[in-house]
Image (spheres, grey):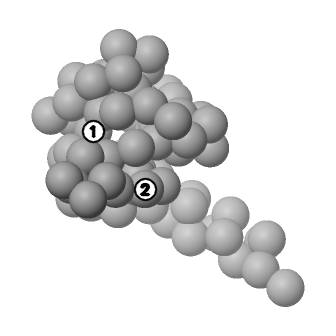
């Protein structure tokens, strides 16, 4: 599990950007400590990398959000 600063260093995103993406439900911390610290697992890291790549190639936040909704529907029973 990574803290937000560690996720930022690993992905090249800033902590501010990660919080912004969380606010828009593009990335979510898997866990929070009692003190409110965010913790990210491997799936969260992959999601952050995906969002970063999608933004870099020109996808809007709305496009990324819709792709997540579509993917979730494909994996629902």
At horizontal 66% and vertical 70% (from top left) the residue drawn is 72
Q: Which residue reaches farthest left?
A: 16
Q: Which residue reaches farthest right?
A: 77
Give the quarter of the figure containing the C terminus. Answer: bottom right
At horizontal 34% and vertical 56% (from top left) the residue drawn is 32
Q: Mark 1 near mark 2, Cβ–Cβ under 8 Å? A: no
Element under disc 2: strand
Image spot of residue 29 (x, y percent):
40, 52
Q: Which residue is mark 1?
A: 18
Element under disc 1: helix
**Picture mark count:** 2
Q: Nearer the viewer, residue 27 or 52?
A: 27
Image spot of residue 41 (x, y percent):
56, 41
In the rendered view, tell whether residue 20 sits above or below residue 30.
above
Left/right of residue 50 with respect to residue 14 in the rendered view:
right
In the rendered view, tell whether residue 44 sits above or below residue 77.
above
Q: Which residue reaches farthest bottom?
A: 77
The label on residue 31 is 2
Q: CA distance from mark 1 to mark 2?
A: 15 Å
At horizontal 56% and vertical 61% (from top left) the residue drawn is 68
Image spot of residue 15 (x, y percent):
21, 30
Q: Residues within 10 Å of mark 2 (few under 14, many from 20)?
A: some
In the rendered view, tell whether residue 6 sits above or below residue 44.
above
Image spot of residue 38 (x, y percent):
31, 47
């Amino acid at each position: 599990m990574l803290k937000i600063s560690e996720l930022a260093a690993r992905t090249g995103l800033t902590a501010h950007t990660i919080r912004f993406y969380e606010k828009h439900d593009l990335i979510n911390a898997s866990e929070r400590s009692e003190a409110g610290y965010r913790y990210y697992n491997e799936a969260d890291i992959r999601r952050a990398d995906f969002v970063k790549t999608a933004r870099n190639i020109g996808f809007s936040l709305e496009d990324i959000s819709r792709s997540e909704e579509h993917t979730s529907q494909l994996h629902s029973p």
